[in-house]
Amino acid sequence: MITRKLFNLTAIFFIACTLGGCNMVSSAVENVTGLAGLNRTGTVINKSWIRSSYAVVAADLLEVKRGQTLDILEETDFEKVHWYRVRASDEDKTEGWVEAQNIITSELLEKSKNIAIENKDLQAQAIGQLRAASNLRLSPELKDDNILVKLDNGSNFEIVDWEFVPKAQDASDIDDKSKGESKQTRGKTRNAEIEAAKEANEPDKMDDKYDVWYKIRLDPSVSPAPGGWLFGRQVELQVSSDIVFYQNNAKKFVAWQRLDNAEATDKNTNKDNTVKVTKPGSWVILSRSNFAKAKDGVEPDFDGIIVLGYDKYREEHYSSYRSGNVWGILPLRVEGAGDNKIFTVQLRNTAGQMEDKRFVTSKDAAGRVKVIEPSGIDKVKDDK
């Protein structure tokens, strides 16, 4: 079968050169790539229709759903919209046109899977949700050639890492343009408050100096692409409902994990499809102030650690441990079973080096959480 296909391809090449010149070869080969098995494939991102053409008025031929694989036969741009000519795997092998924004190519899907594989063993550091439609990207930067898919407003995901990127003064506040689309950016205005702070030699604030990018992990029900990066300005952290009120403006929660076991029945999904733990419990929480405090050009992921225990008889949380101001890097890892847990983070030690620090937690006779702090943690007096 393969020999016959190659023979046909050679014959077409010869006929094209003989009859119309070799300038016809490219179009001839394009028309037989299906025979030689050279087509790309794509996966449907959102439910859509294969249409008879890419014109405004076209017939709907076949509805395709998220996760279905299509052969990509051709692509073109029409009125600033990118289209793929595709072939479905239904009984009729339906061929037609689909907007490119509804398809992720096999090459890009494989790259997204590689990102997910890199972080498959990492515990989720936080839960996030999009406050506006946004592009999932291959890397933490706004480039035209690294868009994987566009995620819908309200999409939820696990955050496994993040990166602080120096803020561009002409950067847009949103990242929702499609591939190839030109979008005018709006310059960031430096207000009087920021200028006054500089004159007073106050420390730089994170919000003014950096944009945060989140490395995320996605469930197949949200996207066929399982991993990538999101622009942080469009992400809202979904702090669990039983601890969100302990957060304050001085230090925001950036990562959190339970120290007790939450059963599946302890979770529910709200109307926005965001999972929140409803049963109160004990938590380890990493927090971050808004002051820049780079060491050797690198900002810490967090600068505070809090352990909150929960008294089930009084039905209230209590503070088991507060680290003071530290300099730490992700990830946060929690290990152990029952009441005895160990959580590990990288902290700057008194010698100025990064070191894994293991905090041991247990419960006393009264059922209250106790924390043993490791030695040699570098602590600063204040955030300035």
Image (cartoon, grey):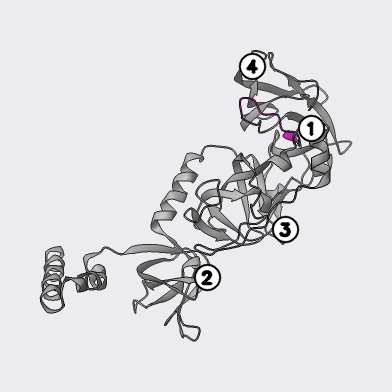
**Mark 2 vs mark 3, CA separation in Å:** 23 Å
Range of magenta residues: 284-301
Residue under numbered circle 3: 270
Callout 2 touching callout 4 (CB < 8 Å): no
Give the mark toward the camera: 3 or 4: 4
Residue 383 belongs to magenta span: no
Callout 2 touching callout 3 (CB < 8 Å): no
| Front in this rendered view, residue 138 or 263 | 138
Q: Quadrant of the N terminus?
A: bottom left
Residue under numbered circle 1: 308
| Amino acid on which the number 3 mark rests in the picture | Asn
Say which quarter of the image contains residue 328.
top right
Counting residues from the start of the chain, the first of labels 2 and 4 encountered is 2
Residue under numbered circle 4: 352
User: Tag 3: Cα neighbours inside 10 Å, few (<14), some, or many (≥20)?
Assistant: few
User: Tag 1: Cα neighbours inside 10 Å, few (<14), some, or many (≥20)?
Assistant: many
Q: Quadrant of the C terminus?
A: top right
Residue at image position (20%, 74%) is 24
Residue 337 higher or lower than 355, as above or below: below
**Mark 3 vs mark 4, CA separation in Å:** 45 Å
Residue 29 percent location from the top left of the image: 22, 69
Callout 4 touching callout 1 (CB < 8 Å): no
Say which quarter of the image contains residue 9.
bottom left
Residue at image position (80%, 26%) is 320
